[in-house]
Image: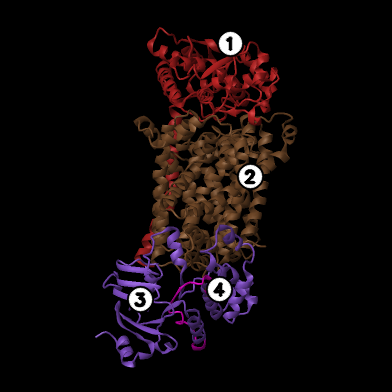
Amino acid sequence: MSTRERLAAGVLGLTLALAPAVVCQSLIPVSAQATRPVLRISAIPDQNPEKLNRLYGQVAQLLSKQLGVPVRYVPVIDYTAAVSAFRTGNLDLVWFGGLTGVQARLQKPGAQVIAQRDIDASFHTVFIANKASGLQPIASQKGLSELKGKRFTFGSESSTSGRLMPQFFLQQAGVKPSDFAGGAPGFSGSHDATIALVQSGAYQAGAVNEQVWKANLRSGKANRNKVLAIWRTPGYPDYHWIGQPNLDERFGKGFTAKLRGAIISWRPSNPEQKAILQLFGAQQFTAAKASDYAPIERVGRQIGKIR
Amino acid sequence: MSAPALLELRRVVVAGRDHPRLAGIDLTLRPGERVALLGPSGAGKSTLLAVANGLLSPDQGTVLWQGETPARRGGRRRRQQRCIGTLWQDLRLIEELTVQQNLNTGRLASWGWPRAVLNLLVPLETQACSQVLTRLDLDPGLLNQPVSALSGGQRQRVALGRLLRQDPQLLLADEPLASLDPRLAAELLALLLDAGATPRALLLSLHRPDLLKGFDRAIGLRAGAVVFDLPAEQLQQDRLDALYASAP
Amino acid sequence: MKPAPPLLLLLPALVLLPVVVLLPAASHGGGWELIASFATAALQPSLEPAVLESQLRGLAITCGVALVSWAASLLIGLALGAASSQVVVLHLLGRSWPADLLARLLALPRSIHELIWGLLLLQLIGLEPAVAVAAITIPYAALVARVVRDQLDALPRQSLEALSSAGAGAPAALWTALGPPVLPGLLSYGGYRLECALRSATLLGVFGLGGLGNDLLLSLQSLQFRELWSGLWLLLAVMLPLEALIARLRAHWSMPARLKLVPGAPAEPVGRQGRQMLAALGGVLMLALACALWLGINPVQLLHWQPLPPLAPGGWQQALQLNWPALIANTLLLTLLAAGLAVGSGPLLLLVAAPWRWGRALLQLIWMLARLWPPPLSALLLLFVLKPGVLPAALALGFHNLGILGRLLNEAIGSASPSAEQALSASGTGPRLALLYGRFSGVARSYLAYGAYRSDVMLRETVVVGLVGSTGLGSQLRESLAAFAWQQIALLLVAYALLTLVGEDLSDRFRRQLLGGTSP
């Protein structure tokens, strides 16, 4: 063996020898984490990522102050991922939609409904249309059949207000997903995207969460000259906070109750809390229970999103 | 000497790394002339041929093809190049194609896309190709063979056949006889001289001066410059000795 | 009437005819405004510090995941390849059936796309950094193992026999006789796998496994095109130097070209260069370890399995009731369309652009972007103007693979001898015909053979464009995942594995016919 050969072999050998050491090294932060638990919060990504980052950054800060534990916001890429990550225990407290919340509780027995917004007991979806499509506001649910043959987009596949409930109301009006142009509806991914896509004309109509729709009208992102609301659905229960079953074990006895109390205590009179409530589009949060979402579970099973 | 020159080089210079590869060459080639280019290796024969067929543009001086300056690109350039055929030392046949397809590549310049594509699909112009093979003493049965299956001598002839299919005014050949045994070399030379007869012209570089029979003119090239330019029969042994003598 | 090689090369492009015919009917005309603003945003990417910071972080994660999974797959693949090589096992154990058994078993991890591995591991293990790495490592290691096995078993065995009859111990004899001849080919292949790993890591990000892909998808979905482009340009700024570096190293060490992955003709034995290569490899592995540390990748995480959610009663019944013939037919149609587009467009575009220098440069740029750009994102972009279905999915998949095949074709053409093309031009043939006859003839067989291998990859990749709807198994898998219908997911995975195993076999046969050799 020449010197160089030895050198090369040495580098290679060293690398291989170091591998186990590195593996052991990387164990340490994990065990350290176990001693001081972090409350990992997340949310279904139903709006623009910047907005989510802003909102949940503030929520994490506020909760950390109120509860005295470190809180971290973990973004997830889609609704399904939020449900899966909740089931696998990677997320402690998640802002779910109606459908995803039911899915999460079915997959994680013992998960607890913590709270909902004042507007969530009776939430609404708005059907919107591009002006150029010629669609006009409709008087009753029957009028949804006008949408047959149009290019139509839902929000995310697992969205309650952007997919489940609008599909349910469409079905009642005799419109199947295969009745849309192209034989299938689109899935824009989020409510903001639905509005932008319908406004641009890529889709002629779509279904969005009423609260996001109103916020877009207020901010001027939705241009009334290009896009209009054509129908508002009846109310149904939607968004809610859900927590892991083992929060009390990990954070101390009574933590779940403390958490619920903290969220429900937010009021517009406090400037910091007001900013958060505004981003949530609500006046305050209220306590909620699992049975409130029984209607969503029923519809979910009917549409085939819950098995 | 009234016919327009097929090829005319005026003060052509091609730069090289140490010394010029061509140092001011003047050369005129008229229809019917069969010219042998002699000189030791490194004298600039290949460079001169590359300038003549347009592969290389000279750094200085002028090249005229049938009295015209070469166009830079486009249809005019292609029309000019069509009149110049080259027999390459490495033949440059397309190994993956059949003999017939290779022969027909001589016509590609005059064919449009449809025929060029059709040639890759079905045998085209079989009669003309057979005639060429017969003229070159090859069995027309070879037409469907892939070129890669041929022997060295057969390949030489197919390459020449492609040139015949092209039917150029000016035939250029760079040491076509270099790697051939004497009998084959003599046969091929005869075919070349025949192909380069009036109204065409032939410019051929030779490594061996003993094959000069049948040429009209001999040009001696050394260090990128013309040393002599004589009727072939007037070429004396002492000039050849001087041409191939090692540098002083 | 049998088409000659250069024409054979253009044959797959015939698929463009039905595509062009179908395109007007499939386009819905809306959204051109969005496409235009997407295109113009390319020139004015967002330079906001917050955006760039988040994207740089994402890019670092993507590169880290790529590097770590690549290094892991190389080491594991090397070991598995040796363990599944007939010659090695025969020599060590005295019989070769364990090697064959292992080789057969390795076909399974290989047949499943890294994205599916990622989504499965996500369900089993959770949102851990190790998941993305494992998702790439598993199929890649199996692929590397196959190449190692093929290379080892194709070597002449005389030197090995000479060494063992001279009394050398079995491991020493194996290492000395087989190591040096296969090393250059393997390292060349390894370099290519690193490029693939970077693409895979980006793609996994699109599906939520972290990294720049995350940012890209979210920017696209929220129509933030300027942010999207800053991410794309950043990715390009990494991918280009990486490709150039690997190409340069390959040239420096005179490694076999990638298009000629036919074993049996190993390059000259490794000497000083071999030591350089080993030193470089060692350095890269160190870097990979550092990345693993930084990303907090902990292999132990992979052992903490979560319980699967309960299976719904009657799920198997429902799963069997899926429209399987249509799903499979759509998947195959998608593969064929995409493969035709990817394999056929490259030569065709090169021919069209042949006379213009800037045209060729533009092609290079477009292919670069195509390689870089994860196919699900092009599919989403296409939905702005096309109706959902097989066509946008095929276009997206075909475009991405065109980028990969186009570069290979370009490399092959660049390294082929220019003499025939020169000869044709010198006799007045136009640049396009000269290219067709003079260069395409020589590269046709090996390009098509690689195209066959790539089509097999595309069959596996159909799953990633599942988000444009009604595109066969891929979109059904997405639907089933969203509904957490585990029985459906299981059956879909089996269908995918079977399909890709059959596809692999077919493409192998086709390639052997073209090249008279094996190996991907």
Cα distance in 3D space between marks 3 and 4: 62 Å
Q: Chain of mark 2?
A: C
Q: Colour of chain A?
A: red
Residue depth check, mark 4 versus mark 2: number of the one nearer the observer:
2
Residue C6 position, x and y percent, is 57, 60
Question: What's the amino acid at mark 4?
Answer: Gln
Q: Quadrant of the image for the C terminus of chain C?
A: bottom right
Mark 3, Cα crowd under 10 Å, few <14 / some 14-19 / many 20+, is some
Question: Disc 3 on helix, strand or loop?
Answer: strand
Q: Is residue C457 above or below residue B244?
A: above
Question: What's the amino acid at mark 1?
Answer: Ser
Which residue is farthest top? A269
Question: Disc 4 on helix, strand or loop?
Answer: helix
Which residue is farthest left? B248
Residue B48 position, x and y percent, is 36, 74
Residue depth check, mark 3 versus mark 2: number of the one nearer the observer:
3
Q: Quadrant of the image for the N terminus of chain C?
A: bottom right
Q: Which chain is purple?
A: B
Question: What's the amino acid at mark 3?
Answer: Thr
